[in-house]
Image (tube, helix red, strand yellow):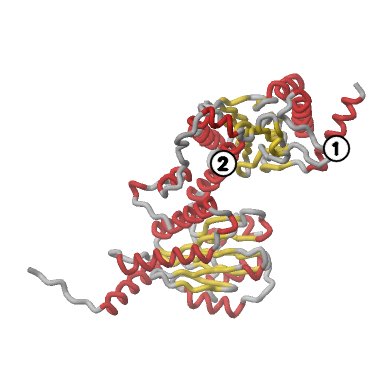
Amino acid sequence: MPLFSTSDDPGSSFPELLRRVGLGPDAMVGASTDLMRELSLPHATTCVALTYVDGVVMAGDRRATAGNLISHRTMEKVVEADRHSGVAIAGAAGAAMEMIRLFQLQLEHYEKVEGTALSLEGKANQLSMMVRGNLQAAMMGMVVVPIFGGYDLRRECGRLWDYDATGGRYEERDYVATGSGSLHAGTVIKVGYRGDMGRDDAVNLAARALWEAADADSATGGPDALRGIYPVVATIDAGGWSRLDDGDLAARYDTIVAEVRSR
Amino acid sequence: MSQPFYVAPEQMMKDRADFARKGIARGRALAAVRYTDGIVIIAENASETLRKVSEIYDRIAFAGVGKYNEFDQLRVAGVRAADLKGFQYSRDDVDARSLANSYAQMLGTIFTHEMKPMEVEILVAEVGLEPAGDQMFHILYDGTVVDERDYAAIGGDAEAINSRLSETWSDGLDLHAAIALGRSALGGPDREIADDDLEVADLARTNGRRCFHRLTRADIAG
């Protein structure tokens, strides 16, 4: 059982605790940009998030690609960070998943040690530090660029942040898209976005944005009716994180398909 | 040169134990009661911010009596040990038994080697996937571990509370019945504990991944 002297105490930080007990991240000694390219590691692609009157919607496709191959069809890039926040990640899948795991653990660890949860801005800051910690890997091509969204219990509204590879943190008011299909997905949201949208409209818009991204970007997966794989779409409001089930999404995509067919 | 007086080991251990027991007896006790959906922990605590009962991991709760700073230090050590183990292996590998053993080692070492023993008694409770998997470990200031099945009481008046619980506990209690039972056992025959002096938290199988849930004063009254 770890015990620390007062001067050596890692406080409520889980990454700091990992370093103290010798489980901190390994430096990537000997890794080079060329080597990373040769390994052709899986990459996660398109994610979007937008605010609506009661909170935020976050959505991501399910495909991971390694070079020109599909390496995973059921990856979950949009995950619950804690009860009132979520994170969506595009970029090098291995590093991204590990970052999400550590981020989730950090939020829970803080909450348990301190007895209260971090503020939403505090969580966004924590993620910023983790992205910055990945800078060395990012320079070798393993870039991880998350979107962070959640419901701010103090300000009683949904808030969104996006990041750059150096940990730069930018709060967005309306919507954000990241990953290879972000240009198309972002444009769909930009055109369809209204400040007074309800949950249902916001979910439809996010689903539509992923559809259009999948239509134009080979690395983004569309809804796969054959295998029953649909994007991950979740909303976060005062009641917390809630993920839409596949049946609901299947119905929404049927509507989109019908509309596209009738053009 | 002055020679230190010889003190027999028996005497030394007894003095330390008396010291620890006295410290623990100064505070209020708490009780844990098993009910249909899990385990509920009821503590007598006038403070609404300095908690005696808290979450360690998905299915594990911690409760401490005695000196606040000492059991809080143990609580944080437990959260760290559990989170580290879950990170290194898997969330399923974190269990109350191994946590209780670590606590016992730590308290035992402190009891014999440090200047003063810790004036605390702690309870580590784990809710199983099925009622048969529910576990409670009562750990004393000197590292003694006792495993309890249906109910447990820790603190100064633990023996009397335990005997009251043994008379009233039965299988198949619901949450409110379990709270009422724990509350009356803590108070004894001549005393009713006020709503404002109760701290209640439960570990329920029905709460999803994180089973720990703190009950508000409104929940307790209703």
When the figure is inspected, residue B76 is found, relative to residue B131, above or below; the finding is: above
Q: Is residue B156 left or right of residue A232?
A: left
**Mark 2 secondary-structure assignment:** helix
When the figure is inspected, residue A81 is found, relative to residue A145, above or below; the finding is: below
Marker disc for residue A98 = 2
Q: Which of B139 and A65 is in front in this view?
A: A65
Residue B98 in the image: x percent, y percent? 50, 64
- Of all chains, the one bearing label 1 is A
Name the residue that disc number 1 marks: A251
**Mark 1 secondary-structure assignment:** helix
- Given the image, on which type of amino acid does mark 1 rest? Ala
Residue A139 in the image: x percent, y percent? 51, 27
Q: In which quadrant of the rendered image does the N terminus of chain A lie?
A: bottom left
Q: Which of A219 and A102 is in front in this view?
A: A219
Q: How crowded is mark 1: few (under 14 residues within 10 Å), some or many (20 or more)?
A: few
Marker disc for residue B118 = none
Q: In which quadrant of the rendered image does the C terminus of chain A lie?
A: top right
Q: Quadrant of residue A233?
A: top right
Q: In which quarter of the image is residue A16?
A: top left
